[in-house]
Amino acid sequence: MTVAPAAEGAATPGTVRRWVLGARPRTLVAAAVPVVVGTAAGWWEGRHHQLVLHSTAALATPEGAFSVIWWRAALALVVALAIQIGTNYANDYSDGIRGTDEQRVGPLRLVASGLATPRAVRSAAFIAFGGAGVAGLALAAATTWWLVPIGAACFAAGWFYTGGPKPYGYLGLGELFVFVFFGLVATVGSAYVQFTHLALLYLLASLPVGFLSTALLEANNLRDVAGDMTANKRTLAVRLGRARASWLYVGSVVLAFVGVGLLAVERPVVLVALLAIPLAVAPCRLVLSGAEGRSLLPVLAATGRLQLVVGILVTVGIVL
């Protein structure tokens, strides 16, 4: 395998910094947002349940009101972040040993750049998944053991995105899995550990989160279309072609705001999230311009900002 330079014309990052960069911190917003939104949804559902069963007067004092179980929210955040980091390292390892990252134009990859051995990166992935497993077991013990197989499915989804003999990311299924695990599973799961009942609110809250996570992945895949075609990595962007894939990105962003509208049926104040629409204009315009490769690098950062702002506003809309 040909080893690519760490960064053309740039100094080699130190030991700590290279591992931080390898964890791809810009993607962590996709892990944090569903936990925050889901926690808010679980809190509201618990409070609403108390309002139905008890008098409003009984809930007038802090002692009588349903409150966020902060240690569960913290553990859910640890699980989400650790799975995301583990997935990033796992992708780095699997793509690196396949040689897929040799033509990559995105963030630094440890194996392809030669800054870390494949074995070290694989170990880092397992350590991150292990940390997520410990936190997840604590949540399962406090709520339901059904979280264990769900967690195992999350680990499998993280590893087999680019790992194994037939990685689903190479088959064009990445967007679907991201929507399911970073939207539905992460949001609903974070809500459930707060108030251990399933509710329509949880599902609706997961829609804008999931579609923006899909857009985040598509921002990556659009940028890497040329390199992925060379490496025979058949992402959905490669299968659709550059022009049609740009509409997949735009469609994901639009559907995120449609999801906000659907959520407003349950919690009308979440319409405040529509104030974030102007943040979507620039990345959508750039994607539709036909720009390729490095010219699309700003789309990832812009999509991350959009997801963060929408997540905050949806959370505010749920709790108010």
Image (cartoon, rainbow, N blue to C red):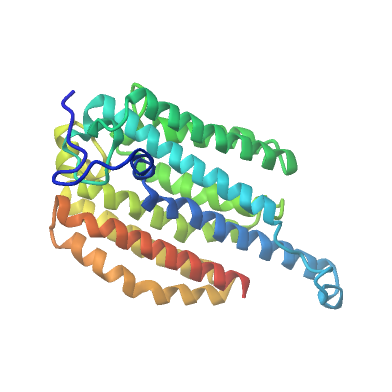
Q: Can residue 213 be spotted in the picture?
A: yes
- Compared to residue 164, the image places residue 313 above or below, namely below
Along the line of sight, the residue nearer the viewer: 117 or 244: 117
- Compared to residue 224, the image places residue 305 above or below, namely below
Q: Residue at x 52, y 73 (%)?
A: 270
Number of on-image labels: 0
Q: Position of residue 57 (x, y in %)?
A: 85, 78
Q: Position of residue 9 (x, y in %)?
A: 13, 46
Q: Can you tell which quarter of the image residue 116 is in?
A: top left
- Compared to residue 252, the image places residue 221 above or below, namely above
Q: Position of residue 65 (x, y in %)?
A: 79, 68
Which part of the image, by quadrant, shows the C terminus?
Answer: bottom right
Q: Residue at x 39, y 57 (%)?
A: 212
Along the line of sight, the residue nearer the viewer: 187 or 122: 122
Q: Position of residue 283 (x, y in %)?
A: 25, 64
Q: Residue at x 33, y 36 (%)?
A: 169
Q: Residue at x 56, y 72 (%)?
A: 316
Which part of the image, by quadrant, shows the N terminus?
Answer: top left
Q: Can residue 161 be spotted in the picture?
A: no
Along the line of sight, the residue nearer the viewer: 125 or 65: 125
Along the line of sight, the residue nearer the viewer: 190 or 265: 190
